[in-house]
Amino acid sequence: MPSLGEFLRARRALVAPSRHGLPDGPRRTPGLRRDEVAMLAGISTAYYVRLEQGRDVRPSVEVLDALAGALLLEEEADAYLRALVEPPSRRRAGGSRRPERAAPGLVALMNTWNHTPALLYNRHLDLLAINSMGRALFSWLGDETNLLRAIFLDPAARVFYRDWARIAEGCVAAMRLDNAGRDDQRLVELVGELSVKSPEFATLWSSHKVRAKRSSTKHFDHPVLGALSLSFENLTVATAPGQHLVVYHCEPGSAAAEALVALDQVSGDGLGVNEG
């Protein structure tokens, strides 16, 4: 599903001509023109047009290097560009239709974190496991098992995430990066559903932005605890490519730490990990 041509068009629209010392006069569309990208990359305009039209999907490493420079791609976007032109034999085009599971050992580990919210999701943001503290933190999720669907389709998400727009953009960019070079049916179905049901998702997906999920701080408006800010670590699971373990934490003795104690009480006796 990810297209080299779509990516090139979206990324050149993001580059201000002045970044390359080109005139910023009136333009019908934002960003660089095709001929300007070709000039900056040292290739012919005709060849660049073929790339955007999908008539040549195997540019050389040298051309990719030049395009990355012309489009001012950051490291993750550069890696994404190269993943799009991998030989088809190296892609997992069909993908497995078997339900993806959390490793039993990882579930057991999460089950020991009685005072730490944690959740596990895959490259499609399907929720694979969540511990009792995580369920108490994300109580609004209910029975929803896909985080992306919840963020864009559940109005409660816009209340829960105090910086919803940033969270939404980051999730879409991370999913696109995680699925570079893949064209599995689950991805097609999820993107198709969300593109129809959420104009905001459709806009973000078509922007072709890519960004890895990094450790940071999230700001919540919890239905019981109110305003709450927690740091989190986003860890990749080495034994299960595409799976991410998210662990929330805070400074000992802080207001957030007191809130986590209260959250522990909210979680009640519901110890254990719920698996998707």
Image (cartoon, helix red, strand yellow):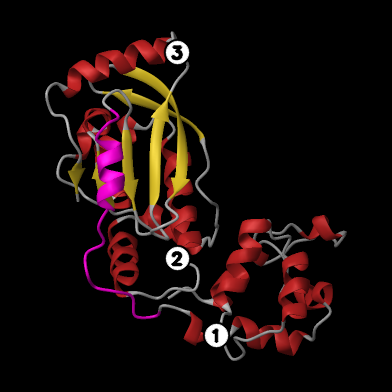
Check the image and report above or below for 35 versus 207: below
Mark 1 → mark 3, Cα distance in angstroms: 50 Å
Graded by Cα atoms within 10 Å as few (under 14), some (14 to 19) or many (20 or more), the crowding at tag 3 reads few
User: Magenta stretch containing residue 10, yes or no?
Assistant: no
Residue 87 is labelled as 1
Q: Secondary structure at mark 1?
A: loop
- Give the crowd class for mark 1: few <14, some 14-19, many >=20 residues within 10 Å: few
Give the residue number, with chain letter if any, for mark 2: 179
Identified at 18% across, 35% down, the residue is: 272
Identity of the amino acid at label 2?
A: Asn
Say if 212 sits above or below 58 in the image: above
Q: In which image quadrant can residue 61 be found? A: bottom right
Q: Residue at x 26, y 62 (%)?
A: 100
Which residue is outermost to the right?
A: 21
The image position of residue 257, as x and y in percent, is: 38, 14
Q: Does the image show residue 9?
A: no
Instruction: Give the amino acid at mark 3.
Output: Pro
Question: Which residue in the structure is indicated by mark 3?
Answer: 252
Q: Residues within 10 Å of mark 2 (few under 14, many from 20)?
A: some
Residue 163 falls in which quadrant of the image? top left
Q: Earlier in the sequence, mark 2 or mark 1?
A: 1
Please tell me whether mark 3 or mark 2 is closer to you in this view: 3
The local secondary structure at tag 3 comes to loop
